[in-house]
Image (cartoon, rainbow, N blue to C red):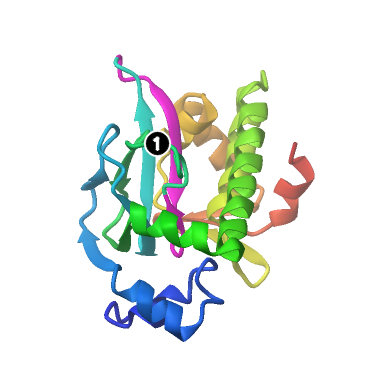
Amino acid sequence: MDKRNVMENLKQFNLFADLSEKKLKTLREFVYWRTYKKGQFLFLEGDLRERIYLMLEGFVKLERVNQSGNLLYEDYVKQYSIFPYGGMFTDQRYNYSAEALTDVDVYYIPTAIFEDMLKANPKQLLSVVQQFSLILKLHEHRIQYITIPNAQDRVIQSLNYLRQDLGEQNGEEIVISCPLTTIGISKISGTSRETVSGVLNQLKKDHIITVSGKKIIIHDPTYFEEISI
């Protein structure tokens, strides 16, 4: 990917795909390119909400913890996603931290410029509202499966969430390229690392998934569709 070809790269994002060349050229003046190494923070909870990021390559983890270090919120950002949506038009500071899970390339746009652009373009604003709706639906499902008493079922529902949120279609299979760990999945599912490992091993034995390097390859997506709550 040529990071210098800003206009072509912006078209890869649904929010900008239908913008005219004139509007893209205007927007280009406010787009900045940055790289972050694995483990670096793009922003911390409480920092001024000065930038809206556009993911070009890599994965970012969004996380919020309380003063005791207990996890309150965790989510992931993949290629061609815009973040953070939380706090749009309302908050002055970020509500969570963003850490690079891999080396990442991003564009960022000053928040004031981004929000003014949405206010002036009803079609783009509608696109953001629709994305809010999709995020809300996914998180509603997360709240539902966290209350499931059976720990193994919570892990399977967590994998289903990750399939929907991060999975990319590859023929009849779905590939999750985000470098997830058993500890990360255990935090999402509210279970132990041992429980996650046990479920993953069983799914591998049943030929439903393969874990190859840092990728999870789902051979039978219908399995998760049928157990979806």
Q: Nearer the viewer, residue 40 or 203?
A: 40
Q: Is residue 221 above or below residue 198?
A: below
Which residue appears at 29% of the width and 68% of the height? 30
Magenta-drawn stretch contains 78: yes
Which residue appears at 51% of the width and 82% of the height? 20
Give the image location of residue 207, x and y in percent: 64, 53
Give the image location of residue 5, x and y in percent: 32, 83
Query: To which residue does mark 1 refer?
Result: 91
Q: Is residue 203 something one can see in this rendering?
A: no
Residue 22 shown left or right of residue 109 in the figure = right
Q: Is residue 52 above or below residue 79?
A: above
Quadrant including the N terminus: bottom left
Give the image location of residue 203, x and y in percent: 62, 44
Quarter-of-image position of residue 96: top left
Which range of residues does the magenta coloring cover? 68-83
Which residue appears at 56% of the width and 77% of the height? 18
Quarter-of-image position of residue 45: top left
Give the image location of residue 28, x and y in percent: 33, 75
Which residue appears at 51% of the width and 57% of the height? 119
Residue 123 shown left or right of residue 88 in the figure = right
Q: Is residue 154 above or below residue 115?
A: above
Magenta-drawn stretch contains 221: no
Residue type pointed to by label 1: Asp
Q: Nearer the viewer, residue 33 or 199?
A: 33
The residue tagged with tag 1: helix, strand or loop?
A: loop
Q: Is residue 159 something one can see in this rendering?
A: yes
Residue lying furthest front in this view? 120
Q: Nearer the viewer, residue 56 or 70?
A: 56
Quadrant including the C terminus: top right
